[in-house]
């Protein structure tokens, strides 16, 4: 008996809350994007104010430290131009950015540590830059957006003559035009 009364009470509440089609028409909600309100009062109360915009911040993803696009160095093992798995997401993000921003241009700079002859290091740096370029092209970037250059051992990132410095110097750097 208690279940029946509870069921009737719930059904009655649901019926009371139900709306008619006319009420649903009147209850439509307009979908809006909130706009930012001015943060300062106008100097003259009679002066009209302009809204500041949609409230969205147009930050440069290339300079945002929280964005993967701010990461620009791809590191390599000794005497290798094989892109490590841990750097593939960085290259992929840059390739996607380039494919969506066809006016952007990059230069990939290949670097090596100080070990090896100057000629060998220039060739290795070029192979590293070309490996990053090839991967970007395969992921959608246009070849006309990418330039490669080898500095070999000429532009070390870390001074020193030990494994820690050599590890920092075995890299390819992604540089956007104008930076």
Image (cartoon, rainbow, N blue to C red):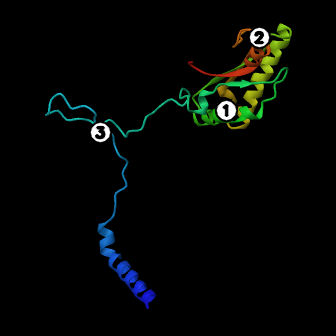
Question: Separation of disc 3 and disc 1 at Cα?
Answer: 37 Å
User: Which residue lies at the image location 85% right of the left edge and 12% below the top edge?
Assistant: 120
Pinpoint residue 18: horizontal percent, then vertical percent: 35, 76
What residue is pinned by disc 1?
Answer: 90
Q: Which numbered dot is residue 153?
A: 2
Of labels 2 and 1, earlier in sequence is: 1
Which residue is at the front of the view, 162 or 158? 162
As drawn, the residue found furthest toward the bottom would be: 1
Pinpoint residue 7: horizontal percent, then vertical percent: 43, 84
Q: Which numbered dot is residue 65?
A: none
Q: Under tag 2, what secondary structure?
A: loop
Q: Quadrant of residue 31?
A: bottom left
Residue 128 makes an appearance in the image:
yes
- Quadrant holding the N terminus: bottom left
Pinpoint residue 42: horizontal percent, then vertical percent: 20, 31
What residue is pinned by disc 3?
Answer: 37
Which residue is at the front of the view, 37 or 48? 37
Question: Separation of disc 2 and disc 1 at Cα?
Answer: 23 Å
User: Is 101 above or below relative to 124?
Assistant: below
């Amino acid at each position: 008996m208690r279940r029946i009364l509870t069921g009737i009470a719930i059904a009655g509440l649901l019926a009371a809350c139900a709306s008619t089609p006319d009420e649903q028409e009147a209850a439509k909600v307009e979908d809006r994007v909130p706009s930012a309100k001015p943060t300062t009062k106008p100097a003259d109360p009679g002066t009209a104010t302009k809204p500041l915009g949609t409230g969205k911040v147009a930050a440069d993803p290339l300079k945002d430290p929280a964005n993967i696009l701010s990461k620009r160095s791809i590191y390599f093992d000794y005497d290798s131009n094989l892109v490590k798995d841990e750097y593939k997401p960085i290259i992929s993000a840059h390739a996607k950015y380039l494919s969506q921003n066809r006016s952007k241009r990059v230069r990939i700079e290949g670097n090596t540590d100080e070990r090896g002859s100057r000629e060998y290091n220039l060739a290795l740096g070029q192979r590293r830059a070309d490996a990053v370029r090839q991967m970007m092209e395969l992921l959608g970037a246009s070849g006309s957006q990418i330039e490669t250059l080898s500095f070999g051992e000429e532009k070390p990132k870390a001074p020193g003559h030990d494994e820690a410095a050599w590890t920092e110097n075995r890299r390819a750097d992604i540089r956007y035009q104008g930076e």
